[in-house]
Amino acid sequence: MAVEQRLFAVGVSHHTAPIEIRERLAVATDAVPGLLERLRTEGLCSEAILLSTCNRVELYTVPPQGEGNLDKVTRWVADTAGAKSRQVESHLYKLQDQDALRHIFRVASSLDSMVIGEPQILGQFKVAYRTAQDQEATGPVMHRVMDRALTVAKRVRAETEIAREAVSVGRSGVELARQVLGELKGRSAMLIGAGSHGKVVARSLLDYGLSELVIANRTFERAADLALTFGGSAVPFAELERYLTRVDIVLCSTAAGRVLISRDDMVPAMTQRRNRPLVMVDLAVPRNIDPRVHELDGVFRFDVDDLAKVAGRGMEKRRQAAEEAERIVEAETERYWRHIVGEAVHQRIGGIVSAAEAVRVAELARTTAALDHLDPEQREALDAMTRAIVKKILHQPLSQVRSWAENGDLEHVESLFAAFGEVQDEDA
């Protein structure tokens, strides 16, 4: 068994895969518990957390004690995409141990986000953690890692200006709409669904002078609640197509997991609009708006990857804040990984001490059985002497292994533990 406490992170993000790949791996909220259960019953992990957003799908796992096959976990993730798993696997990143820990800290701190510094990921991160807890899919390792990740994210926001410098998803959506429509005052929009990104963009559009917002949701009561929040109006989901002819902007942000507005739906709508420009922003993964609608005259369709390009233009303003945040994450990763390794080393030392004590007790019992003339005081003195001998023999090598562990010299740590293991095997 290696000294390190094994930790794996496998997934795709907007950095490594286009939306066509990400939507194959996207996991609906109600499907997460079943996948977490499968991971454990199939023996791939002892602890797991699954994070699925429009920009990333990631699995964080702790393998079973004494085991751990990162390639197996990677193939399992790819297989959830179905028949084209090999194509998906080429886009997956797979990280382990300290690299996995660093990645988790960066994700929670919004350093790996489409929009660096955006706040949505931290909420999504917390939900993924809570879901895993509810399924009893987390244990001591993940509890410590996730709690520390949240602490690191809080520190990044408190000690840098990364959040203040963020170009938000909402601002990116506004910029795309203004590229097509120009001034937004007097314009109207329809929000379909209640996804977090859709609400952020809708709020930003209103801040830039949007005059009307209508909201459609499969649950009308939910649409009515959102309409009250935004000062808009709710419309029945069944009347969605009618409003496609009226509004200037359509925002789609549902968890339907399929296309809701097809190219065929848009043909008659654009005829009635007489090709008056329509901006369609699809914020869902899997996508809700057929990509082919962009082929129609007057339709300008954008998705989350397009928002990423807009957000990227403001990167220079955020670079300094991001560099400061990266230094915090790196320091926290180094310090906390050594803490985790230190705990594993401490457990291994405890095992060696226990094994040595068992040998001492057995040998003492064998010896004293032949020395029946010893009185209790002599037996106690013999016990104390053998205990002191074992302690003195172990003191120097175990002090050395602690020093190596503190300095990150795990190769020497492993060699010493291996030597103890070989001795125990020979005795056995």
Image: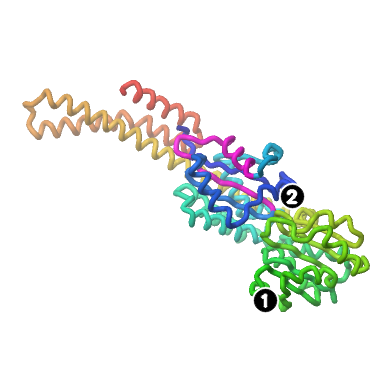
Name the residue tied to disc 2.
19
Whether 65 is among the magenta residues is yes
Whole-percent x and y of residue 186?
A: 85, 76
Mark with earlier residue (2, 1): 2
- Identify the residue at horizontal 68%, vertical 50% (top origin): 323
The residue at the far right in this view is 274
Identify the amino acid type marked 1.
Ala
- Whether residue 381 sits left or right of residue 149 in the image: it is left
SS category of the residue bearing label 1: helix
Q: Between residues 209 and 133, which one lies in front from this camera angle? A: 133
Picture quarter with the N terminus: top left
Q: Are marks 2 and 1 in contact (CB under 8 Å)?
A: no
Check disc 2 and give the amino acid type.
Ile
User: In the displayed structure, would residue 415 be above or below residue 128?
Assistant: above
Mark toward the viewer: 2 or 1: 1
Secondary structure beneath dot 2 equals helix
Q: Is residue 238 left or right of residue 334?
A: right
Q: To which quarter of the image does residue 371 belong?
A: top left
Residue found at x 8% / y 28%:
374
Q: Quadrant of residue 382?
A: top left
- Asked if the stretch drawn in magenta spans residue 154, the answer is no
Residue at label 1? 224
Q: Which residues are magenta?
A: 55-80
Say which residue appears at 73% left-offset and 77% top-offset. Answer: 232
Residue furthest to the top = 426
Q: CA distance from mark 2 to mark 1?
A: 31 Å
Tell me, yes or no, if residue 50 can be seen here: yes
